[in-house]
Image (cartoon, grey):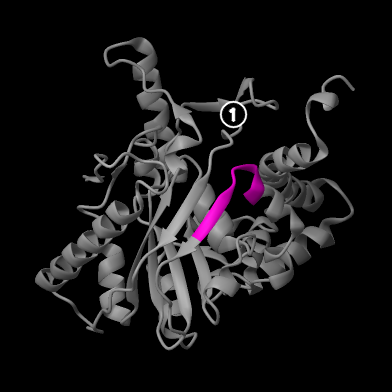
Amino acid sequence: MAFLSRLDLQECLQTLSVLQWIPVYIFLGAIPVFLIPYFLVFTKFWILSVLALAWLAYDWNTHSQGGRRSAWVRNWTLWKYFQNYFPIKLVKTHDLSPKHNYIIANHPHGIVSYGVFINFATEATGFARIFPAITPSVGTLEWIFWIPIVRDYVMSMGVCPVSGLALKYLLTQKGSGNAVVIVTGGAAEALLCRPGASTIYLKERKGFVKLALKTGAYLVPSYSFGENEVHNQETFPEGTWIRFFQKTFQATFKKILGLNFCTFHGRGLTRESWGFLPFNRPITTVVGEPLPIPKINRPDKKTVDKYHALYIGALRKLFDQHKVQYGLLETQELTII
């Protein structure tokens, strides 16, 4: 009771909403990974495992063919508590016409990409109201869709694999008014995440530009101000044993799961305590002006480089126009490596 007296009900619900993804994904992942083999081999309920595996085989390509989104899941009240924890905000600078398809590239990755998740995979900030007639799909690692139950859960929020096959399908086979959202810096950029940093991986990240050219989808820059502020990341000194262990563990984790293991911390269950919850700091995702892209079936390197440079220019402009308003110094520059 003494602990609960320190938190009002609203803050408790907000904290629990952010915590929920850990037990939810562990629980949803553990059910099929452990119970399906157990039921199949050791119990009389083997038919349940057979049916689950048969459904998975039948439904195997759904995640790469537009998925199976649920407006009900995207509008859960849970996501509003999640949004208000920081809080997270979505800002439109230009309209997106439903006559076109779009690739919304987002920066920076941060530790978890909270801004991208809440703004584009849920309706907590009102995406459908802000961008009417536009259907967003958030790209993530494909191996997540190999896990029964988990795949259905993430698909219900409009999450899809960040693969050429899945993204191209959404941009060419689902009519117009579609927007795929890609955090272009990926797992590698997570290691650059720390408060005050505005460094992104983009110079050699040109696959999204090539995809835009092949599909004729407009490129849209977006930047999540505050994404790097919600966790503190620790990089140990070079030459120490703990740095060697850190690098080895990160390399192994990246090879197996495609993720970079970040050594980070934030707040605990109370604002003043130490823990792994994100700090209560605002995240504002600003969506910029669409950059028209011609459709070219086989774009050459020169063409890709041209539109990649145009995109970088548009991103820098967006960053510079909004950085002071959302907490950065006038002298802060966007560093692209």
Q: Quadrant of residue 222?
A: bottom left
Which secondary structure, mark 1?
loop
Compared with 70, 174 (above or below) is below
Amino acid tagged 1: Phe
Q: Outermost residue toward the top? A: 240
166 on left or right of 18 = left
Task: Check if residue 260 falls in the magenta segment.
Answer: no
Residue 228: where, in percent of width, then height? Answer: 43, 39
Residue 65: where, in percent of width, then height? Answer: 52, 76
Quadrant of the image containing the N terminus:
top right
Give the magenta part as a residue range. 83-90
The residue drawn where x is 24% and y is 64% is 311
Name the residue carrying label 1.
Answer: 276
Q: Outermost residue toward the left? A: 302
Residue 161: where, in percent of width, then height? Answer: 49, 63
The residue drawn where x is 18% and y is 77% is 299
35 on left or right of 103 = right
Instruction: Name the foreground residue: 15 vs 167.
Output: 15
Instruction: Name the foreground residue: 251 vs 331.
Output: 331
314 on left or right of 62 = left
Compared with 79, 274 (above or below) is above
Compared with 234, 96 (above or below) is below
* Label 1: few (<14), some (14–19) or many (≥20) C-alpha neighbours in 10 Å: some
Residue 42: where, in percent of width, then height? Answer: 82, 45
